[in-house]
Amino acid sequence: MTSKALRAELLLLLTALIWGSAFVAQRVGMDHIGPFTYNGIRFLLGALSLLPLLLMRRRFSPLIPQGGGCQILAGGLLAGLILFAGASLQQIGIVHTTAGKAGFITGLYVVIVPLLGLLWGHRTPWKTWSGAGLAVAGLYLLTMTDQMILSQGDGLVLIGAFFWAGHVLVIGRLSGRRVEPVLLACLQCMVCAVLSLGVAVATESIYLQGLQDAALPILYGGLLSVGVAYTLQVVAQRDAPPAHAAIILSLETVFAALSGWLLLDEILSERGMAGCGLMFAGMLLSQVSLGKAAPPLTEPAVVFPSLPVETPSKVMGKVESRPSSVRP
């Protein structure tokens, strides 16, 4: 392994750590402010934190190709709407579940993406179906109670995972049209922020003391999870094949569970741990490349989150529809 490849994989590992631990920030933030207030401020900070990277990329190439202004505005609006739906469901759901469970359930979008790709006529190989089977079995063990009931929080996060998957597919199609990825990310964050703040003003009580108490989780979720982690991912994927990046970034789910255990004293039962293991195995199986090694990208792929994005975060490669993490 070359020094560049090693550096890239270490940066991707750090990115997965930031995104995974951001689930804890989301969970703690809900103790002080409403979900839409949290998301609104967080994504606004995220959009602003991407501006330095945007200006840096502007030095090397035009951000908007000739005649592409309407396309990128429309794409940013559509991606922002889907991001708003996924992030809102995840943020509301995380109030009623643990950070670790939310991370693993959100991570299912890795398996959902190729299945939804059938709607676009994409071929789905056997490893994807096998991975989906393992993931569903793991989801059952992780979320279903002895009374065969899915909790409200887990259900909302699960629905959100389908929106994260749709988000990946939309971004994949936009990236294939040479839309500047950082500009698109900035636009979609701004759209999500405006929508979230609009709902927050209409439905939530916003107090200065609550904002002060939630300042650290908001800063972590907005600046680190979006600005810093996104920049690290863009830099790292210049030297990392998409398949490697996908597997490393899938560790976001593991870091979410570990962070919940270390910082919030969240404990999974043996059944829950077995479910997490099956889900993680399914995610890896759905992404691993069994053919020729994928060539390196000439342009970085884009992952959004956890955010966690987070996206919960999500490869937005040029023409790749295979996601690489949880996130937004």
Image: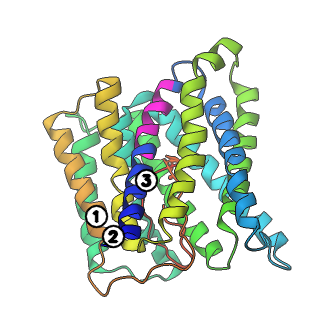
The residue nearer to you, when weighing 74 against 43, is 43
Image x and y of residue 52, in percent: 71, 52
Q: Position of residue 188 (x, y in %)?
A: 69, 54
Image position of 157 with respect to 161: above or below:
above
Q: Is 187 located above or below residue 103 in the figure?
A: below
**From this viewpoint, which residue is outermost toward the front?**
3
Element under disc 2:
helix
Stretch in magenta: 19-28
Name the secondary structure under disc 3. Answer: loop
Residue at (62% x, 73% y) in the render: 175
Image quarter of residue 67: bottom right
Q: Which residue is mark 1?
A: 284
Say which amino acid is labelled 1: Leu
Residue type of the residue flagged with mark 2: Gln
Which of 268 and 228 lies nearest the eye of the viewer? 228
Q: Residues within 10 Å of mark 3 (few under 14, many from 20)?
A: many
Please report the residue visible at 32 percent of the width from the left and 80 percent of the height from the top.
125
Residue that numbered label 3 is attached to? 326
